[in-house]
């Protein structure tokens, strides 16, 4: 494959594991990805999710940046309505100074959490998302060499020009990225419904900017790569069950295995599993063939890979099998 491949790391904390242990696995993940030639790794802001520990992407990136040397690291993304653009400029300006030429800043307008956490714990107004376009422009200005507020500069941040990416799973993000002349990343690994419509609109309506004269589109896709197709099928069954368990389990009492069997086969369970509609599964060759199809289907310049596997060793092996398909 000649298409650039990047990775999403959700920094999953498995049952019985400490946060520190989960972070060390993310370090190992990044180091192996760097050795194998992947383009970048992104970390996403989530709150009040006991199995995902990437609540502060900037801090995680700072740690992993010190343990790696060449791979790009970024937020995929920072949920900008949760923050002051000025503070995010300082954080990612600092990261760019620490790791020059290695930092990306993906921006989303979703809260990354539930409404109670947003309103009472984060103390944010849900209506703040309405200011997302203006906040993106302000952040861009803080990172440039022209401050948006006389007498105030982001230090660090000023003049770092950290590259911004608009993230989305609907037409809103596609429209904004096209209008601002910024790269666009579509979250088709869990929100597949509007992929074709959004990426087509983005390319057809792109307004060139000085930094990005051409559109640049990243599409996310799930991968289950194994030694055999049969092993990949088995892993997929476990992944589907755990996805249903995690999403349904948030709403009440944890499900027994018997209850889970019933929910997986229900209409609700099938809806959850359909979130993983875009999944490349099988041997390395099988996965490469699917990804080549998906790249054209999504009109993507780069693919952001979400490795789906039941365990960390399976994740690393899947990463290696996929890397074998990369062109030198």
Image (cartoon, helix red, strand yellow):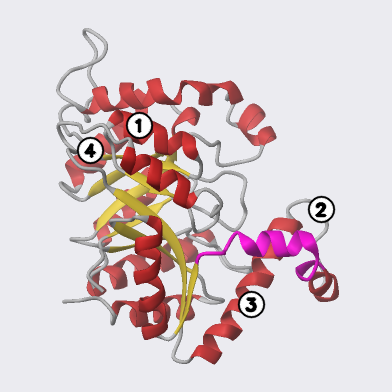
The residue most toward the top is: 150
Q: Are marks 2 and 3 in contact (CB under 8 Å)?
A: no
Label 4: state its secondary structure.
loop
N-terminal-most mark, 2 or 3: 3
* Residue denoted by label 1: 88
Q: Could you tell me how far apart the alpha carbons at marks 3 and 4 are, in whole angstroms?
A: 39 Å
> In the picture provided, is 132 more to the left or to the right than 164?
right
**Seen from this angle, which residue lies furthest front?**
204
Q: Report if the CB atoms under discs 2 and 4 are less than 8 Å apart.
A: no
x and y percentages locating residue 209 in the rendered image: 20, 31
Badge 2, how many Cα within 10 Å: few under 14, some, many 20+?
A: few
Identify the residue at horizontal 80%, vertical 66% (top origin). Answer: 266
Tell me which label, 1 or 2, sits earlier in the chain. 1
Distance from disc 2 to disc 3, alpha carbons, whole Å, reads: 21 Å
Cα–Cα gap, marks 2 and 4: 41 Å
Q: Main secondary structure of the magenta part?
A: helix
Residue at 57 percent across and 63 percent down: it is: 276
Closer-to-camera residue (89/304): 304
| Label 4 sits on residue | 162
Is residue 182 shown left or right of residue 120?
left
Q: Which residue is mark 3?
A: 238
Give the mark nearest the N terminus, 1 or 4: 1
Residue at (35% x, 31% y) in the render: 88
Rounded to the nearest whole Å, what is the CA distance between mark 3 and mark 1?
37 Å
- Check residue 252 in the rendering and tell me which mark sits there, or answer none: 2
């Amino acid at each position: 494959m000649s298409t650039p491949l990047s990775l999403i790391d959700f920094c999953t904390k498995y049952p019985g594991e400490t946060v520190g242990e989960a972070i060390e696995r993310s370090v190992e993940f990044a180091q192996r990805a760097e050795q194998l030639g992947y383009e970048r790794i992104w970390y996403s802001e989530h709150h009040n999710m006991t199995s995902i520990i990437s609540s502060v992407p900037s801090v995680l990136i700072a740690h992993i940046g010190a343990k790696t040397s060449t791979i790009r690291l970024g937020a995929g993304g920072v949920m900008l309505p949760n923050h002051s653009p000025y503070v995010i400029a300082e954080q990612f300006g600092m990261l760019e100074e620490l790791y020059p030429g290695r930092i990306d800043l993906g921006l989303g307008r979703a809260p990354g959490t539930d409404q109670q956490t947003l309103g009472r714990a984060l103390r944010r107004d849900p209506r703040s998302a309405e200011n997302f376009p203006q906040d993106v422009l302000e952040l861009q200005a803080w990172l440039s060499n022209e401050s948006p507020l006389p007498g105030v500069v982001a230090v660090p941040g000023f003049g770092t020009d950290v590259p911004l990416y608009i993230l989305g799973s609907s037409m809103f993000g596609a429209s904004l990225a096209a209008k601002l002349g910024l790269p666009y990343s579509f979250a088709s690994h869990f929100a597949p419904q509007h992929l074709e419509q959004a990426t087509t609109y983005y390319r057809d309506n792109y307004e060139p900017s000085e930094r990005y004269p051409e559109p640049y589109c990243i599409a996310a896709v799930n991968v289950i790569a194994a030694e055999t197709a049969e092993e990949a099928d088995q892993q997929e069954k476990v992944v589907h069950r755990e996805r249903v368990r995690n999403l349904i389990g948030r709403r009440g009492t944890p499900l027994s295995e018997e209850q889970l069997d019933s929910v997986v086969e229900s209409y609700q369970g099938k809806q959850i599993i359909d979130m993983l509609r875009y999944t490349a599964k099988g041997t390395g060759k099988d996965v490469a063939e699917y990804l080549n199809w998906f790249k054209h289907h999504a009109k993507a310049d780069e693919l952001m890979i979400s490795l789906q596997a039941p365990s960390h060793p399976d994740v690393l092996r899947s990463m290696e099998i996929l890397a074998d398909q990369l062109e030198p």
